[in-house]
Amino acid sequence: MAQFFKPKKKASVNTKHQSVDVVRLDHNGAGIAFVDKKPVFIEGALPGEKAIIQFIEQKKQFSRAKLIKLAQKSEKRQTPICQHYHECGGCNLQHLQHEEQIVAKNEKLQELMKKQGVSQGEMVQPIMGEELSYRRRARISLMINKQTNQLDFGFRKKQSKAIVNVRHCPVLVQELDQHLESLFTLLNQLKGKKNLGHVELVQADNGSVLLIRHVADFNEKDQQAIVNYCEERNLILYLMPEADVLNHVRGEEPFYLIDGTKIYFTPKDFIQVNRNVNEQMVEQALSWLDLNENDSVLDLFCGLGNFSLPLAKKVKTVVGIEGVDDMVQRAKLNAERNHLSNVSFYQANLEEEASDQVWASTKFTKILLDPARAGAAGVMETVAKLTPQTVVYVSCNPATLARDSQLLIQHGFKLTRLGMLDMFPHTGHLESMALFER
């Protein structure tokens, strides 16, 4: 008998307004309430508040709701600093006092580790910098508004591809923020503005960097207008006509300093967004590793050498491993430019088992790793089998840190220190550092 596919009907969402008591924050900064013992996630709500909500998604294990109004406000609530806060998708915790953000993130970090059965040692003081004017990088979205034929210029709206028009961003470093208004004016006057993709601004230690992604060549007049703009403001200019093509048009090669070491980069490369916190983070990691001149250190997910190069000044040898070959080549060049001959860099896919790699048969006394949000599950077995004395794990996702910690503990390591890094104030992003000793 033939059977015909019948699509399941979408479960209807109860849109009736309801009053709930918010009890805590989740690890992304959303408020959590409970309705019929099921968690409801409410963006913009704080613990201790009585919220009027409307469900926007209802699933078997959880629901999501929109905050309609507050019947009772938390004393820890503050007026958001940015006029675009309720639309822009960049920040999601400006309604919570900054010191309370630190408390909440610290508690969430400990809670996630405990939930995974990881007993922690000393909880150290969070690494903190300025709560405003801290971002040294921004990607600005561009789109022709069909109604006005003008450029929309700014950041993506919350959970949307639409653009919030922004001329001032309080979390952007002032050196970059001061260019937003004039840059919008410049781009909007270009004849070929319909061919613009996006813009990136990066603050290097030797100047501000402007990258323009474009999908067709600029005419001579447009090109000259862009160059003139950059010359007037002494901007380092890159043009990107294709996703894998980067043309350095004017200015010096950008770099930043870390522990007296110059790290050269291109605007396509990953660098830590918060300069102040990055400097403190590197200093703490090197301190926790308790380095001496006889140590051999493995730096996994090493990028351009943010940790590797400062490490090389203090130990016998350093090996840095990175998945992106272009960054490996630039890390090698950075080592040469800083006259560091005791550090080597290799390309390897660290999402896969790595015991057959040449470097994985080397004896290392200390290991540092700084993976992306997905964590380091593919390489943790190798880390454990190398039996270093200490491991420092720098994490941008506490859930994967907690997961990866379990394997180290199973292999005889103990978590002795744990601390939060306030890399992204006014957002739910939670960065941390953990020290394991064998």
Image (cartoon, rainbow, N blue to C red):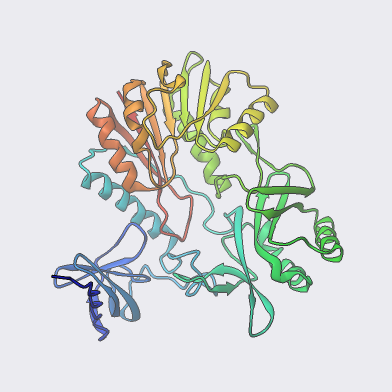
The image shows a total of numbered marks equal to: 0
Q: Toward the viewer: 101 or 15? A: 15
Residue 315 percent location from the top left of the image: 52, 19
59 on left or right of 227: left
Residue 225 lies in what quarter of the image? bottom right
Above or below, 50 relative to 16? above
The percent coordinates of residue 99 (x first, y second) are 41, 58
Relative horizontal placement of residue 355, taking residue 318 as reference (left or right): left
Residue furthest front as drawn: 1
Between 367 and 171, the one nearer to me in the picture:
367
Q: Is residue 89 above or below residue 112?
A: below
Residue at 38 percent across and 59 percent down: it is 100
- In the picture, measured across the screen, residue 352 lies left or right of residue 147, that is left
Q: Quadrant of the C terminus?
A: top left
Q: Farthest residue in the top direction? A: 294
Q: Which image quadrant for residue 177?
A: bottom right
Horizontal side, residue 38 vs residue 283: left or right: left
The relative height of residue 65 versus residue 437 in the rendered view (above or below) is below
Residue 340 visible: yes
Q: For the point 34% across and 35% down, which residue is it?
A: 417
Percent coordinates x, y for residue 421 in the rendering: 44, 46
Residue 61's quadrant in the figure? bottom left
**What is the quadrant of the N terminus in the image?**
bottom left
Front residue of 175 and 161: 161
Residue 382 vs 268, above or below: the answer is above
What residue appears at the point 69 percent right and 61 percent down from the top-left corner?
Answer: 215
Question: Where is residue 43 shown, x and y percent of the image?
Answer: 36, 70
Q: Is residue 315 visible?
A: no
